[in-house]
Structure formats: structure tokens, C-alpha cells
Amino acid sequence: MQTKLLTLAFIEIALAIAVSVLILFISFKMLQKVFFKNNSIREENMAFSIFTAGIILSIGIILGEIIPSITNMIRLSMSEGNDITFSKIIQYSGLYLFIGFAFAIIINTSVFLLFSALTKGVNEFKDIQENNIASAIVVTATLLSITLIAKDSISLLISALVPYPETTNFLL
């Protein structure tokens, strides 16, 4: 049995659960305070629930692209001859999560601006507050589509920030 790999797997599972719960909790609270102060998922507003689920899924998709980079940092720190400390892992992880969260906000904001530009005279937020399920589904589908299109680019950006060891290029 490879104890190093087993340890890494447990660290990744714990990290993924802890980070995702924290980020999704913060996101939900921000969404509620910024956009829907008087709504909750307990009320009979299915449109708000659909919209909230879409945002949570969007953030989850983005987080799913960030966790492997954090795991790569941990793997690098466990390899011989590498000087990545625990504080560096925390710093890089914080940076990766900040970038992911910032992109989630940018994607969500761009969807709202896109809909405002495309549907002049229609207030999607008001429609969602008034339980217009059709508006919630269309906004949520657009949000998820843009997230799925952008997720690989976000993953590439985060991967580029992982401090991999220097290698020589023997082809030059």
C-alpha cells in the first residue's frame, strides 16, 4: 500500500469538502444580501431556488478546476528536493481560491449584464423575485453555459501559477 498516495488522497478529499462548503456558504450569503434580501429558499419562490442552484453549480464547476492545482502543490511539497513549505501551500491556495472566486463573480456579473443588454425592458431580478420560473431557467442556463465555456481557461490560468520545479529544455 502506498501510504504517501493514500495520505494525499485523504488530504485532497478533506480540502475539497472544506473549501467548497466555505466558498459556497459565503457565495450564498452574498447572493442573498446583495440581490435578494427578502427571499429565501424556504419560501414558495421556485424561481429564486433555481437561480440560486445555478449560481452554486457555477461556483462548484469553477472550484472543481482549482482543487487539482492545490493538490499539485501538496504533491510537489511531498517530493524530494522541493522547498515548498506549508505556508507557501496556504498562500498559493488562497491565491488560487481568490482567483476562482473573482472569476465566478465576473462570470455571474457578465451574465447579468448580458441579459440586461439583450432584454431591454425586462428586469430579470424582479421577475425572479416574483417567481417567474422561465426567467430563472434562462438566466441559469446562460450562466452555466458561460461557466462551462470559461472553466478550462480558468484551469489553465491556475495551473500556470503552480510553482513547478525548473526543468531544462534539452531540445534547444
Image: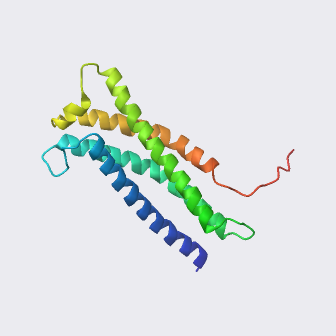
Q: Quadrant of the N terminus?
A: bottom right
Q: Residue 100 in the image: x percent, y percent?
A: 49, 47
Q: Who's the residue at 33% across and 27% down the image?
A: 115
Q: Is residue 2 visible?
A: no
Q: Who's the residue at 33% across and 21% down the image?
A: 118
Circle count: 0
In the picture as drawn, the residue positioned furthest to the left comes out as 44
| Left or right, 140 with reference to 88 | left
| Left or right, 23 with reference to 138 | right
Q: Residue 85 in the image: x percent, y percent?
A: 65, 67
Measured along the vertical axis of the image, is residue 65 above or below residue 153? Answer: below
Q: Who's the residue at 36% across and 48% down the image?
A: 57
Q: Quadrant of residue 129?
A: top left
| Left or right, 123 with reference to 9 | left
Q: Quadrant of the C terminus?
A: top right
Q: Residue 171 in the image: x percent, y percent?
A: 85, 46
Q: Quadrant of residue 146?
A: top left
Q: Residue 49 in the image: x percent, y percent?
A: 22, 46
| Left or right, 74 with reference to 132 | right
Front position in the image: 172 or 116: 116
